[in-house]
Amino acid sequence: MTTAFEKTLDAIDGLHAQDPRTTTLKDGTTMPQELAYAQRMSKWLTPIYAAPGELLQLAVRAQHLQRWQVPREDYDKGRVGYLTWRRDQGKRAGETTARLMEEAGYSAEEAQRVAAMIGKKGLGRDPEVQALEDCACLVFLENYFADFSRKVEHDHMVRIVQKTWGKMSPRAHELALSLPMSAASAALVDEALGEA
């Protein structure tokens, strides 16, 4: 018999798989971008948080749920537009995940807890929300940082690394420093942390 957790996870991954954008994995296969991102998030959870419960696992898996449906370009340029877009995305992903959870048999309270984690409510105070944020930062550093840094002005990129670092736990710092990086990426991290 399928559990509520398995039903919800399948439903989340089903929505991720609808992402029309694809990414090429290290083995040369392609996958919907959002599904790849979600799997990368889940991969980092156990190194960050020992024995994560079902609710945290679902929140981590659903953090970017259907993000492609509301492009960043639909919002104003600059920091305020970015923060508004990110907040709205978190709210949408949380609401959708909560609905999927209730349909699968979770209580309203459990569903709202996951929505709150996805919305990053309690960041810095709630260990589970911190674990979700740590996963997101590590996924960025491992998979997207090098390409992103080639598109962003150098001083701005230094500030992004500093802000990312400031949101991470000591355990995530340790894991981040063990990531393989190109010489250019490593130099950028060194510069950012030297100025932090």
Image (cartoon, rainbow, N blue to C red):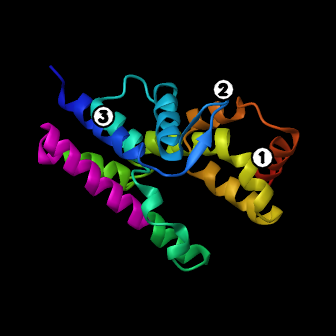
Q: Quadrant of the N terminus?
A: top left
Kind of residue sitting beneath label 1? Val
Residue 102 against residue 158 in the figure, above or below: above
Closest to the observer: 71 or 136? 71
Q: Amino acid at mark 2?
A: Asp
Q: Earlier in the sequence, mark 1 or mark 3?
A: 3
**Mark 3 sits on what residue?**
10
Q: Is residue 131 visible?
A: yes
| Residues marked 1 and 3 touching at CB (< 8 Å) | no
The amino acid type of the residue labelled 3 equals Asp
Instruction: Look at the image and say whether residue 95 sits in the magenta stretch.
Output: yes
Image depth: mark 1 or mark 2 in front: 2
In this picture, residue 139 sits left or right of residue 103? right
Relative height, residue 28 to residue 190 (above, below): above
**For the point 54% across and 51% down, which residue is it?**
21
Q: Quadrant of residue 87?
A: bottom left
Residue at which label 2 appears: 27
Question: Looking at this view, is 175 or 40 the one in front?
Answer: 40
Q: Is residue 24 above or below residue 93?
A: above
Alpha carbons under labels 1 and 2: distance apart = 27 Å
Examine the structure image and report whether residue 28 is included in the region drawn in magenta: no
Earlier-in-chain disc, 1 versus 2: 2
Which portion, as a residue range, is magenta? 87-109
Mark 3 Cα within 10 Å, few/some/many (few <14, many 20+)?
few
Q: Work out which quarter of the rendered image holds the C terminus and state it.
A: bottom right
Q: Which residue is mark 1?
A: 189
The residue at 46%/50% (across/down) is: 19
Select label 1 or label 3 by which is in front: 3
Residue 85 horizontal/vertical position (percent)? 47, 69
User: For the view shown, which residue lies furthest in the bottom direction?
Assistant: 76
> Quick one: which residue is furthest to the top in this view?
1
